[in-house]
Image (spheres, grey):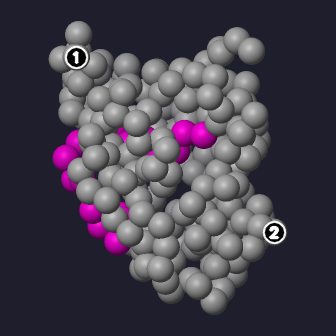
Amino acid sequence: MPTEVAAASVTDLDRVVADLHAAFMDDPVLCWAFPDEGRRRRYGRHYFEMQARRLVPGGLAWRAEGGGVLWAGAGRWCESPLEALRLGASTFRGLWPRGGRVARGLLGIESRHPREPHLYLAVVGVRPERQGQGLGTALLGPGLAEADRLGLPAYLESSNERNVPLYERHGFEVTEEVRLPSGPPVWLMWRPAGADLRAE
């Protein structure tokens, strides 16, 4: 199937959310937060809806048949207090009685987020039936090109070890491996400004 990546707009929100939600149904961190599949389907979707509504209007989101990617611009990686409250309210019921542990783990990851200006790869996902066909690489391309154009580094948190080599091929380096409380590890990864340019 051909890979055609296009900028995502607010009219694409439902499609982007559906693709990201399908891509992450078996994600280790999402499974840790929501062990019950029914809750994972319901409350996981809330998370991707909130992220898409926040980030797509920023102009750093792309879609393709079967996948999508959301970036945050420099200084825009963190939810506002109101956005954090809405996200927490929409998912807290689904996390009960694990809410404290999950919140502690995720806040620990967020506390390590670099303060230096950078583009943040908030989420990239490909539906299971489209994985292994180069779609993830294609979706990463426009955001990495924008980081290079702006002369900015990029940052991400990988919740799945099998994706780490993909990011490394695009200039990211693991800076830290953090284990969530009674849960899986998360790999924090940094891509220096102009990483692709230096590799040529």
Q: Badge 2 local density, few (<14 within 10 Å), some, or many (20+)? A: few
The CA distance from mark 2 to mark 1 is 44 Å
**Mark drawn on residue 199:** 1
Q: What is the magenta range? A: 108-125
Q: Amino acid at mark 1?
A: Ala
SS at mark 1?
A: helix
What residue is shown with label 2? 38
Q: Quadrant of residue 181?
A: bottom left
Q: Earlier in the sequence, mark 2 or mark 1?
A: 2
Q: Amino acid at mark 2?
A: Gly
Q: Is residue 49 visible?
A: no
Q: Quadrant of residue 47?
A: bottom right
| In the image, residue 116 lies in the stretch drawn in magenta | yes
Q: Quadrant of residue 79?
A: bottom left
In the rendered view, would you say 92 is above or below 65?
below
Q: Position of residue 192 (x, y in %)?
A: 21, 33
Quarter of the image where the N terminus is located: top right
